[in-house]
Image: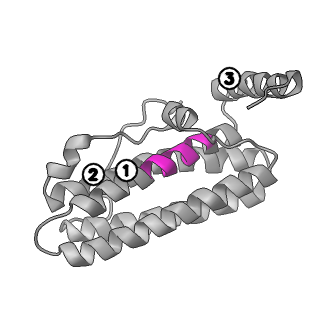
Amino acid sequence: MKLTAEIEAKYQAELKQADIDHHKPTAGAMCGHIVANLWYFDVKLHQALWYLKGSGTIELQHFYQELIAENRQQLDELGAILLDENELPPATVAEYTQYTKISEEPRLKYQSVTAILDETAHDFTTADMFIDRAIILAQREQRPVLANYLTQLRGYNNRKTRLLQAQLGKTAWEDLVEVDDDED
């Protein structure tokens, strides 16, 4: 790949703006975390799909296949909306890794169905922290299309979390309250 001075200048300007946006968060910067979370979540959903075992596995595999398809659609839609909003969503594995807050655990494949479902519900809760912040920022920045999409994404997450929790015999948010250390 041939790098020109113009390309390098654009990339350096992007890095400088990303640093500024992450010190005083913007809706675009917060959505960068959401994009990264969606990308990492795709990997974790596959892990769950491939390693579920035990009672109810067939039905749960269908559920996870739907989650994967919907997650990929959300990733593409949010990326397009960010481009429409003149933002640059993360687009490399290094950027996804830097911005994600979804944790990986290779040992999850050995866990019970219950543990895998619980992990997925917690991942939705982690994702919601960034979605909630991004909604507020998008509203403040008067970005109604972005705020609307993020609000719909939050509603989707609420529904899927409730369904996962129901499989575990719990109410929608039972045992899912996370402490947000960054909230100030």
Q: Which residue in the structure is indicated by mark 1?
A: 123
Image height check: is 43 above or below 32?
below
Image spot of residue 115 (x, y percent): 18, 54
> Of residues 51 and 116, which is closer to you in this image?
51
Q: Secondary structure at mark 3?
A: helix
Q: Are marks 2 and 3 in contact (CB under 8 Å)?
A: no
Q: Which element is circle 1 on?
A: helix
- Report the residue marked by disc 2: 119
> Mark 3 — residue?
19
Residue 127 showing in the rendered view: yes
Asked whether, in this view, residue 134 is left or right of residue 5, the answer is left
Dot 3 crowding, Cα within 10 Å, few <14, some 14–19, many 20+:
few
Q: In the image, residue 127 lies at what x, y percent?
A: 46, 49
Query: Please, what is the dominant secondary structure of the magenta stretch?
Result: helix
The answer to whether residue 140 is magenta is no
In front: 84, or 132?
A: 84
Horizontal and vertical percent for residue 1? 73, 32
Q: Residues within 10 Å of mark 2 (few under 14, many from 20)?
A: some
- Measuring from the top left, give residue 108's x and y in whole percent: 21, 47
Q: Which residues are magenta?
A: 32-41
Residue 100 sits above or below residue 158 on the image:
above
C-alpha gap between disc 2 and disc 3: 31 Å
Query: What kind of residue is marked 2?
Result: Glu
Dot 2 and dot 1 residues touching (CB under 8 Å): yes
